[in-house]
Image: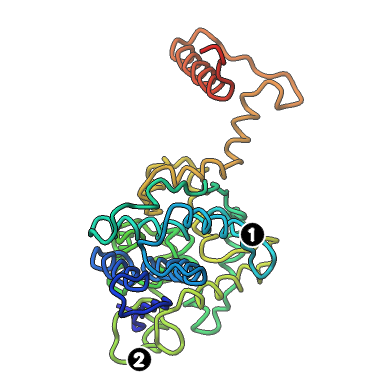
Amino acid sequence: MTRRGTRLTRPFPGDAADAHGLHRACVDYLDWIEVRNYSPRTIVGFGASLAAFVTWCAERGVTRPAEVTRPVLERYQRHLFHRRKPDGMPLSNRTQYGRLVPIRGLFRFLVRHNRILSNPASDLELPRVEHRLPRHVLSKAEAEAVLAQPSLVLGFGVRDRAVLEVLYSTGMRRRELIGLSVWDLDAERGTVMVRQGKGRRDRMIPIGERAVAWVTKYMADVRPGLIVPPDIGVLFLTKEGLDFTPDHLSGMVTRYVDKADIGKRGSCHLFRHTMATLMLEGGADIRFIQQMLGHAELSTTQVYTQVSIRALKAIHTATHPGAANHPHRDVPDDDPQRADATQDLLDTLDAEADDEHPDPNR
């Protein structure tokens, strides 16, 4: 649906004609995962990671998969650990993890297709990935301040306001917004279809009335003047009549966040974090937020339970005897359900204590 085709570049060193070389192995592996319907973005990322690995191996005289041993992979893993970026900072555990996963996939593929006898990466331990909280999350007032920044005098301001409203209302990813078509929005039902999101999954999610109103206004008053025939149906168009690139969209949103002067920075993902956190604080079940965000695993969504500190603070103030500077209201302790829940909590804490400090005599 996009006008820009995804060109997969695979700049591997070595002899491409060598059927037993690392160059040919990587190209065949990327072709294989492409056939298995991996996304173009994933394939490009895997290709970049494998190209760096093959280059590192070539500098050390290792040019064939059969020459890659477990010690070679461990040396490469240490190389990633000690590598420094141009600003002098080390690679994060998440980056190191992302560089090593395609290598494990490559050798698993080679063993499965009888290209090598054993898998040197089978027992390679990957770095533990840290679970980081979002750096910034907007309050309701801060979100409204950002939404008010586009100038509505120009048509592009209406378009930009519509973009911000969709991000705020749905929390969709920037690539998902870029891929929206004019047929994906159902204004009557208040839903929007996100096609081929992360993991190549489609999902239908609700969208607020205000966001629908701004998108409808944009489609009626602005979009017709941006269309360059033939109209391929992309919802949000640039002044050239093309779909947005990810960097272009991020730059636009960042400018409005900075212009709002709220003391926070961010871009498209800032609205994703904000939508999830505000819905959670408003009482939404985390499973519904998981569906909105398109997370395959609930554990991915649970990070927002940690972000929602204001709701936790309110509960803490209402229930903890030492939280407020006045006598705390006593709660009757004759509720059997409360007693059962309390005992379950104490049992869980005891189990956690055993995990942290195991009995050496056991």
Position of the N terminus, as image quadrant, is bottom left
- The residue lying at 36 percent from left, 83 percent from top is 4
Q: Is residue 319 above or below residue 119?
A: above
- Residue 241 sits in which quadrant? bottom left
- The residue lying at 53 percent from left, 72 percent from top is 250
Few, some or many residues within 10 Å of mark 2 (<14, 14–19, 20+): few
Few, some or many residues within 10 Å of mark 1 (<14, 14–19, 20+): some
Q: Is residue 117 above or below residue 156?
A: above
Judge by depth and name the residue closer to the eye, 269 or 74: 74
Q: Which residue is mark 2?
A: 228
Judge by depth and name the residue closer to the eye, 266 or 73: 73
x, y percentage for residue 145?
62, 64
Numbered disc in front, either 1 or 2:
1
Q: Amino acid at mark 1?
A: Pro
Q: Which residue is mark 1?
A: 90
Furthest-bottom residue in this view: 229
Contact (Cβ within 8 Å) of mark 1 with mark 2: no
Q: Is residue 322 above or below residue 19?
A: above
Q: Alpha-carbon distance for marks 1 and 2?
A: 46 Å
Locate residue 255 relative to residue 183 in the image: left or right: right
